[in-house]
Amino acid sequence: MPTSPSTRSMRAAFGSELASARRSYFIHSAATMIATMPTDAGAASARQATIKVNGHPLKTFSLPDPRQATGPIIVALANGLERGENKIEIVSATTALAMNATVFTSYYVPWGKSPATTEENLLSGENRALRWKVEYDRREASLGETIHCKVEAERIGFKGYGMMLGEVGLPPGAEVDRASLDAAGVDSYEVQPDRVVFYIWPAAGGSRFGFDFRLRYRMESSGAPSALYDYYNPEAAAVVAPVIFSVH
């Protein structure tokens, strides 16, 4: 995008009080900026720019020559970030014709502050919504006892959209009854160590199915979270928080 000022500012919120589906933003997380900032054709390639985080210089680098093909400049930002809102600037005395900058983050969110809900979640969008319900018939069981899981998945306003993926979280040591999965009536499934992933084509009124699993260890432990999302947009997910299982 065209820009003319010598200082560009971007504001990004990173803090433990914020939340994003599945993925808190604790400030001791990893954050990386990738920037491409060519100077004008008459500027010397040795001109420099500085990335500042909250007013403090983090890294100074040479601006690339616009007449040459160059790769992106990658800078780790985590050490300069603070809890709450952060201000990131690229400062240079050189007038730039254009700048592209992207910030990649990786972080964790406590379940109590996340948008995840218990048993059922509804994620609303501009043109459609995802409804996801995961219910276990018991959370306390004897060793080897069968637990039945009921699942409901629906894309509201489903017409014209593709496959959904539904992840049902399992506790440690769960042994899934594959016969019950085969009888569930879903398009396909994949058993992973801590979850079962279902491939679901949306239907009017949603899909309802269930399956069984047994617990092989005596324990009290949380299972994995459960989530429903579009195949090509896993970040926009309806998430159900994990539950604690007690096996005696």
Image (tube, rainbow, N blue to C red):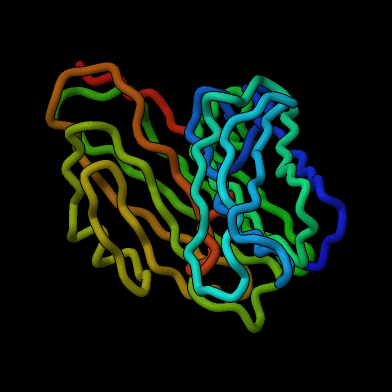
Instruction: Return the residue nearer the eye: 225 or 216.
Output: 225
Q: Residue at x 17, y 33 (%)?
A: 173
- The residue positioned 50% from the left and 29% from the top of the image is 29
User: Closer to the camera, 22 or 71?
Assistant: 71
Q: Relative to 9, is 163 above or below?
A: below
Question: How far across and how far down the image is residue 244, in percent?
Answer: 38, 23
Q: Give the farthest residue toward the right.
A: 5
Rendering coords of residue 2 (x, y %):
81, 67
Image quarter of residue 130 = bottom right
Residue 78 appears anywhere in the view: yes
Residue 81 at what x, y percent from top left? 61, 26
The quarter in which the N terminus is drawn is bottom right
Residue at 45 percent of width and 52 percent of height: 151
Q: Residue at x 50, y 37 (%)?
A: 76
Q: Can you say whether 156 is above or below 55 in the image?
A: below
* Nearer to the camera, 17 or 171: 17
Find residue 8 and report its horizontal and vertical position in percent: 79, 47
Quick check: 128 left or right of 111? right
Question: Is residue 197 shown above or below 219?
Answer: below
Is residue 117 toward the left or the right of residue 55 in the image?
A: left
- Residue 239 in sight in this render: no
Quarter assignment of residue 145:
top left
Judge from the rendering whether residue 235 lies leftward or rightward of residue 166; answer left or right: right
Q: How many marks?
A: 0
Q: Where's the C terminus, which quadrant? A: top left
Q: Residue furthest bottom?
A: 160
